[in-house]
Image: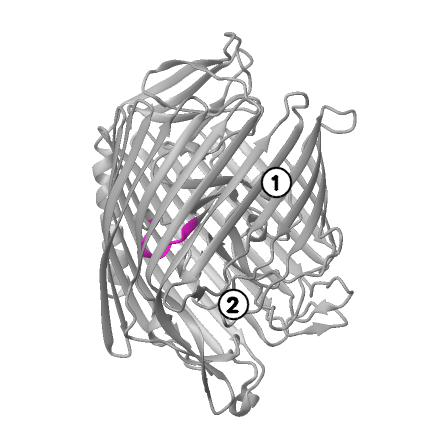
Amino acid sequence: MKKSQFVLIVFSFLCTINIFAQNTIKEERNIKGIVIDKNKQPIEGVNIYLPEVLKGTVSDKDGKFLIENISNKKVKAQFSILGYETLVIDISNESAEIVLHNSIIEIEEVVISGGFVNTADRSAVKIESIPLEELAFNSSPSLTLALADEPSVEMVKLGNAITKPVIRGLSGNRVVVLYQGARVSNQAWGEEHGVFIPEEGIENVEIVKGPASLLFGADAMGGVLNFIPLKPLLVEGRKSKFSTSFYSANSGVQSSFVSQKRKKSWFHTYGLGYQNHADYKLPNGDFAHNSRYNQHYAFGNWGVTKDWGILKGVYSSSYTNTGLVEGIATESEREMEKPWQQVGDHFVTAEGVFWHNDWTLKPFVSYQLNHRKEFEEEHDEHEEEHDEAALDMMLRTTRFDFKALKSNNNYEFILGSQGMYQMNNNDEHAHEILIPNAETKDLSLYTLMNKRKGNLQLQTGVRADFRKITFLDKEMSFLDYTYSLGSTYNLSERYVFRANVAKGYRPPNLYELSADGEHHGADRYEKGDENLKSENNLETDLSLHIHGKHYSFDVAIFNNKIDDYIYLASTSDTTDEGMTIYEHHQDDARLYGGEAGIDLHPHFMHNLHLKSTISVVYADNLALDEPLEMTPPAKWNNEVEYVFNDLSFADKLRLALNYNHHFAQDRISSMEDITASYSLINASFGLEKGRHQFSIHAQNLMNVEYIPHLSLLKEQGVFEQGRSVSLKYSVKF
């Protein structure tokens, strides 16, 4: 099927749904009520948000609230304010009395990545939600690097620019990244192919740990990183923010602007940003040569919410230029030099939400153009063509996702279908053809059910996936299924137990099947295997969540058995030019481990925040009886923070100190070397005064020399950056 035909079909489908939905629910109502504490006292400033209809408000000085023009259906509402427990309830009455209970721990975010609107501790799958505010109050130069402080989350790194998320030991095409609601397709098979996400326009990041293939497709067998976009303003008006940052270790600068507006039922958000970083400084004063990078981006989204439903649209464009590190230099440079890569990403999405009786219909369509170029030092016959890219690939991906949700009392049900049409094209002038021109088509059907009965919540579902890949006049098809069964049980008001069993599935991708060429960016010759089978995994998760007025505690363990695990391994053969030949293999594997964390606000000092987490994962190749390559070591993260409020010179003052210990990795494959342990200390200082925010951050305060086990610079012996001081400022208007 040609792309134009596919888009026409999806467009016609959306129009049909739109016409159908506009002739369904027409009745409107207003939701009003009062928010009080356990002593019947009104609470002012409570954020009331209805995520299913993208509307909300804030309670007034008498605790009262009013949300107008809501569809005549039962909706979920989130009530949140610092100092009280977050409450998520179904609202079907036009008038409600809401009682919030005191809690010193942070506001608990509502999560959506589990399929149903819920709080993180009551989701049947393990989901972490990190607000952008917390990620921004961090010494890391990017959001993705800041996520590596979370338990069981790491990053495969090539300097500071090229990063790839690792969740519970799995990465690449086993972890799905979503941006603006759309799956990111970025040629993730290359170890030096990073994920580049614009830094602005994000509300929070949700991390799904464990197989999420049921909702997000075959490639989500390891987990999901979901970059949730800013939610619309709750009240009419416009809000804007300008931010700028400076980083000393690489003389880096970042600037961004974002603006939001709401007028009655219409809303929009737009933003743009730019960052430029030179080579980063090592602890000994030298520099990681060619670790420079720069990026510019712009995005905009719009929407309208009516009694018949919601329409939303997004456009996002970003270009990222990154150097490929080659050894050590005595001076830092900023201008790009070979080898380097350029990645351009363009997203267009359209989404609808329509209501029909107890059903909610959610059509979604997205288009992404990923353009990757790699510029390398000249090789023999190409010396005179130095301005042309050695590798030049266009990846065009069109997806649709249709969900029908039924909600009735304590029962929720999803019936859905997803599809994809993807084309990979090599530029005719490119010197290297690593993977051939190809077409990939996906189609899936799935269903998911959530049932509550008393203290028990049960969630189960099943999915079937079909994939067809066409390349070099060959056609390959893959068909498989996934399922999950999970539950949460409230042992009491403070204790929540979670159990989940899920089967995942991932067919081999185009690169694993068809690669056959020199990859100078990785300095090797890579070969695929057309006989590869699909990976299948079965993961079991058990976890316990405990929370009180001044603390919360989480512990989780998992066991993940993967049949026919695909990996790339070196051979003893070389090409005529001396490049080592790498081939794809399959063996059974097992990953297991867990994480634990405590979050504490002592009773005698409510403004003091103590947090400690530890995580560990073990990964074994069962056929070779040795550990898998690139398995992250155990890590122990600790944070102490104190907040001063209502000072004479500031509304809020934050002081934070982080101590992160990464254990030695001596469970290694025969192709790896042991990685030594190391400890890092980071410090932060932040001020808020009116519309202004200013912060100072120090990363690697003790100027430690270290190389993470997942660093792609380990063979070169290039350390991570040394001590770095960053200055951040933002103003809201």
Q: From the top left corner, tell me how far across and down residue 94 is, in percent.
A: 34, 15
Q: Residues within 10 Å of mark 1 (few under 14, many from 20)?
A: some
- Location of residue 39 with respect to 169 vertically, above or below: above
N-terminal-most mark, 2 or 1: 2
Which element type, helix, strand or loop, lies under badge 2?
Answer: loop
Q: If the image is split into quadrants, where does the C terminus sit?
A: top right
- Location of residue 419 with respect to 530 vertically, above or below: above
Q: Which residues are magenta?
A: 216-224
Q: From the top left corner, tell me how far across and down residue 707 is, in percent.
A: 64, 62
For mark 1, what is the residue? 241
Quadrant housing residue 487: top left
Q: Residue at x 67, y 45 (%)?
A: 659
Q: Residue at x 21, y 44 (%)?
A: 16
In screen coordinates, is 648 left or right of 573?
right
Q: Amino acid at mark 2?
A: Glu
In screen coordinates, is 254 left or right of 577?
right
- Of badges 2 and 1, nearer the viewer stands 2
Q: Amino acid at mark 1?
A: Lys
Disc 2 + disc 1, Cβ < 8 Å: no
- Location of residue 189 with respect to 557 vertically, above or below: below
In screen coordinates, is 336 left or right of 34?
right
In screen coordinates, is 331 left or right of 28?
right
| Residue closest to the eye, 541 or 89 | 541
Q: Any magenta on residue 121?
A: no
Q: CA distance from mark 2 to mark 1?
A: 33 Å
For mark 2, what is the residue? 192
Which element type, helix, strand or loop, lies under badge 1?
Answer: strand
Q: Can residue 519 be seen by looking at this rendering?
A: no
Q: If the image is split into quadrants, where does the N terminus sit?
A: bottom left
| Residue closest to the eye, 398 or 488 | 488
Q: Can residue 697 be seen by looking at this rendering?
A: yes
